[in-house]
Amino acid sequence: MITLTVNGEPREVEEGTTLASLLESLKITRGMVAVSRNQEIVHRDQYPAVVVQQGDVIEIVRMVGGG
């Protein structure tokens, strides 16, 4: 297990977890969020390839409609 910070909260995940699987475990639809890893935006098509590491800081922002 490794420990990340996800939206300011510590979270333990299995080693080898990708951003896609992290979002799935949080029951978040990939198309409806923007994700940064260590203050760098990750493009949605890269979520399956990006493996999170011990100490990563992940920010997940849900997009909302309106104006």
Image: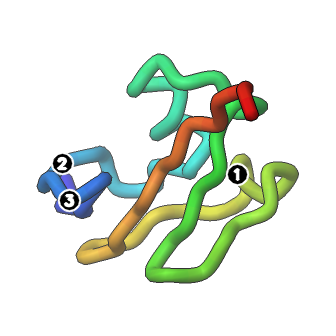
Direction bottom: furthest residue? 39
Q: CA distance from mark 1 to mark 2?
A: 18 Å
Task: Give amino acid for label 1.
Answer: Tyr
Looking at the rendered structure, the secondary structure element under dot 2 is: strand
Measured from the top left, where is residue 11 in percent x and y?
18, 48
Measured from the top left, where is residue 57 in percent x and y?
34, 71
For discs 3 and 1, the disc positioned in front in the rendered view: 3
Task: Give amino acid for label 3.
Answer: Gly
Q: Which mark is residue 8?
A: 3
Quadrant that contains the C terminus: top right
Task: Give amino acid for label 2.
Answer: Arg
Quarter assignment of residue 62: top right
The answer to whether mark 2 and mark 3 are in CB contact below 8 A is no
Quarter assignment of residue 65: top right
Direction from residue 47 to residue 25 in the image, left or right: left
| Residue closer to the observer: 18 or 33 | 33
At horizontal 38% and vertical 72% (from top left) the residue drawn is: 53
Direction from residue 26 to residue 55 in the image, left or right: left
The numbered mark, 3 or 1, whose residue comes first in the sequence reads 3
Does residue 65 lie above or below 37 as drawn?
above
Question: Label 1 belongs to which residue?
Answer: 47
The answer to whether mark 3 and mark 1 are in CB contact below 8 A is no
At horizontal 72% and vertical 27% (from top left) the residue drawn is: 66
Question: Label 2 belongs to which residue?
Answer: 11
At horizontal 56% and vertical 50% (from top left) the residue drawn is: 19
